[in-house]
Image (spheres, rainbow, N blue to C red):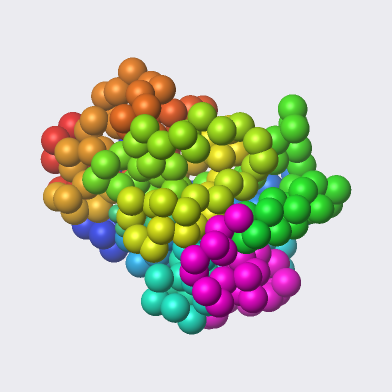
Amino acid sequence: MHIFQDQAEVADALASLTMKAAEQAIEERGSFTVALAGGSLIKLLGGLKGKNGIDWDNWHVFWVDERCVPHDDPESNYGGALQALLSDVPIPASQLYAIKESLCQKNEGAAQPCAAEYDARLKGLSRSILPTKDGLPIFDLLLLGFGPDGHICSLFPEHPLLKVTQPWILPISDSPKPPPERITFSMPVVNAAKKKCFTAIGEGKAEMAATIIKSAGDDPKIPASYVKGDVAWLMDAAGASLL
Ligand SMILES: O=C(O)[C@H](O)[C@@H](O)[C@H](O)[C@H](O)COP(=O)(O)O
């Protein structure tokens, strides 16, 4: 757990942690797979802009969850990350794994086909850049957010999806956080990743950050409590104020 003065310092620490994971993965396997959340995480991604010595050519970027909307919709997590960082760095466009936009022209009913297409696309990559173990993909790094209710990705408290183990990518059509139609990594896919990083910025995150960190694990009221393994927390002073 690392506590910093303000958001700018957290963004810088997030950049350092991501760069280190990338260097290690590229040295070991020649590629780096990172999956991003949406929400307030997006504004921290800019910390990677202008950093030297990054081998962007070998980065592969995914989304841990996505709203089923066109890419230019303000709700699009891909669109947000593009604006915050990805349009400014030379990652080949084919290595940005956005959801298939043509399946999302109408939000209603989009989650099922979107999730199936994303799941099939990821499984296709398991023969190349996305190694698997015990039938699950091993992402190098997940940059996660959490909601005030303790949700992560689009896995919400006491929602049946929390317990679903197959396929890798799940559709949700009744997300309590709008918009309702989304796709999300399953909890086993989250936990199979090599490293996960949570960020908590501002007073609004303090109470739930403390609850997650102090939780005994696997509390269906707090999806974030299921996250296990190598988990880093980067927080500002306000986000860490109730620890
Ligand atoms: O699409 C989304 O809604 C996000 O990916 C989601 O999983 C996010 O990480 C949390 O909702 C926290 O969002 P905030 O940090 O904005 O509260």
Is residue 152 located in the magenta-colored stretch of the structure? Answer: no
- Give whichever of 220, 18 is nearer the camera: 220
In percent of width and height, residue 38 lies at: 42, 60
* Residue 11 in sight from this viewpoint: no
Q: Quadrant of the N terminus?
A: top left
29 relative to 77, above or below: above
Q: Residue at x 65, y 59 (%)?
A: 113
In percent of width and height, residue 138 lies at: 67, 40
- Direction right: furthest residue: 127
Number of labels in the image equals 0
86 relative to 154, above or below: below
Left or right: where 109 falls relative to 75: right
Q: Quadrant of the C terminus?
A: top left
Magenta range is 83-112
Is residue 107 located in the magenta-colored stretch of the structure? Answer: yes
- Direction top: furthest residue: 216
Q: Residue at x 49, y 57 (%)?
A: 182
Q: Residue at x 56, y 64 (%)?
A: 110
- Give whichever of 194, 8 is nearer the camera: 194
Left or right: where 9 falls relative to 71: left
Q: Residue at x 48, y 81 (%)?
A: 72
Quadrant of residue 179 in the image?
bottom left
Left or right: where 100 falls relative to 214: right
* Residue 229 in sight from this viewpoint: yes
Left or right: where 29 falls relative to 165: right
In percent of width and height, residue 153 lies at: 45, 48
Judged from the image, the quadrant occupied by ligand 1 is bottom left
In percent of width and height, residue 53 lies at: 60, 66
- Give whichever of 151, 159 is nearer the camera: 159
